[in-house]
Image (cartoon, rainbow, N blue to C red):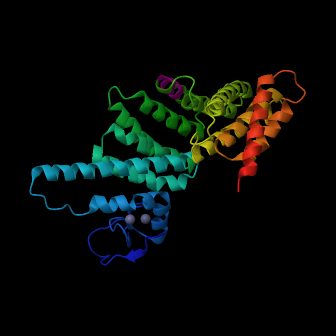
């Protein structure tokens, strides 16, 4: 932390509140001097979540405006500040999203709160642009098992959507997905399924049926069927999801081998971990609930190998690739998959050695 903790000069003065919990503040960030905290723990939590990335921006947003005699100069200054505020919202949004994707829900909250606070300031308290912030907060609180807080943010999101005629399908997809998560987490399975199917409907409208976003809705539905003790439906949905990801990763691999470039930027770290968890969850289910089906397992191991290869982790790619190869050994089918796996192993071995 480059920002040191400074006690406020006048803690008994006007009400100064902690940015995270609204209790009276005793500390402020020594760098931007506009962010206040009740204690070092909250300062540390905010720093890790988002403050390190936005502190310099806050300094420039809060810098006193230079004296301009011309109206045009004042206008330009105003536009620049507005641009910086939008940038701040964007950073806070991305950081909250990243923490939620990697299931580090505690870290997501300060970033999502900052996102919400600035979105309110810029777009007003009733804007539909607040919905993504409400949904990130709700998702994080579901992850932390704080259902009443999750419910509160979801109600605000629903309210904003209800008051926005012609709301975009992307917002509806996100709203239904988060509602589905809440209902699934609280054991209301029929309504969870209703929301996930609405989620899939709107996601396919925006991204198409054959998209990673839509596919995640199916994965979430499969989990609800499993909780309802319907392993056969779970199995058929998981088979769809596994098939989708296998085809998607094969296409990405093909694109790389055609262009002859190194794999890069296919997946962010958080997304790679998320997909890895999803594929391994399907593998675990198949091992526990179904007679071992080597075809599906081979597809899953091959997908995991491609996923890690595309994320430049060659040792993991080798580990999963070898498992996939073993599963289809001796079978006369799967010739094209065998060839793809052998190419992958060859590529991963070569690059694994090249690593320093
Ligand atoms: Zn606090
Ligand atoms: Zn600061």
> Is 327 above or below relative to 57?
above
Q: Nearer the viewer, residue 356 or 306?
A: 356
Residue at 69% across, 37% down: 306
Q: Nearer the viewer, residue 230 or 8?
A: 8
Q: Is residue 238 left or right of residue 156?
A: right
Q: Is residue 271 left or right of residue 231?
A: left
Q: Quadrant of the C terminus?
A: bottom right
Magenta stretch in the rendered image: 199-205
- Residue 204: within the magenta? yes
User: Can see residue 7?
Assistant: yes
Secondary structure character of the magenta stretch overall: helix
Q: Quadrant of residue 53?
A: bottom left
Number of residue marks: 0
Give the farthest residue toward the front. Answer: 260
Residue 325: x %, y % from top left: 83, 34
Residue 224: x %, y % from top left: 64, 32
Q: Nearer the viewer, residue 191 or 327?
A: 327
Give the farthest residue toward the left. Answer: 69
Residue at 19% across, 50% down: 76
- Residue 2: within the magenta? no
Residue 344: x %, y % from top left: 74, 36
Residue at 22% across, 63% down: 64
Residue at 31% across, 78% down: 9
Q: Is residue 130 left or right of residue 182?
A: left
Q: Is residue 17 left or right of residue 170?
A: left
């Amino acid at each position: 932390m480059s920002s040191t903790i400074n006690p406020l000069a006048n803690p008994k003065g006007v009400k100064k509140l902690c940015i995270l919990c609204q209790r009276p503040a005793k500390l402020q960030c020594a760098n931007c001097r506009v962010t206040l905290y009740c204690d070092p723990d909250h300062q540390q939590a905010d720093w890790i979540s988002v403050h390190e990335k936005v502190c310099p921006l806050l300094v420039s947003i809060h810098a006193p405006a230079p004296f301009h005699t011309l109206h045009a100069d004042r206008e330009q200054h105003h536009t620049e500040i507005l641009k910086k505020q939008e940038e701040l919202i964007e950073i806070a949004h991305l950081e909250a999203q990243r923490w939620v994707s990697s299931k580090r829900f505690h870290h997501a909250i300060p970033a999502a709160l900052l996102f919400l606070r600035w979105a309110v300031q810029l777009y007003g308290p009733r804007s539909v642009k607040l919905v993504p912030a409400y949904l990130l907060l709700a998702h994080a609180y579901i992850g932390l098992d704080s259902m009443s807080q999750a419910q509160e943010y979801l109600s605000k999101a629903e309210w904003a959507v209800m008051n926005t005629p012609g709301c975009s399908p992307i917002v509806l997809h996100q709203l239904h997905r988060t509602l589905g998560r809440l209902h699934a987490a609280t054991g209301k399975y029929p309504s969870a399924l209703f929301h996930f199917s609405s989620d899939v409907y709107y996601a396919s409208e925006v991204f198409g049926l054959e998209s990673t976003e839509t596919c995640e809705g199916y994965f979430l539905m499969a989990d609800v069927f499993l909780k309802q003790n319907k392993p056969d439906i779970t199995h058929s949905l998981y088979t769809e999801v596994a098939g989708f990801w296998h085809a998607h990763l094969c296409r990405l691999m093909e694109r790389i081998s055609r262009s002859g470039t190194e794999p890069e930027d296919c997946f962010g770290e958080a997304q790679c971990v998320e997909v890895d968890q999803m594929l391994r969850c399907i593998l675990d289910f198949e091992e526990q609930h179904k007679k071992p089906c080597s075809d599906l397992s081979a597809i899953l191991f091959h997908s995991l190998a491609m996923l890690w290869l595309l994320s430049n982790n060659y040792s993991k790619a080798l580990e999963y690739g070898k498992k996939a190869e073993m599963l289809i050994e001796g079978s006369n089918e799967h010739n094209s998959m065998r060839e793809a796996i052998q190419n992958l192993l060859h590529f991963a071995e070569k690059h694994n050695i090249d690593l320093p």
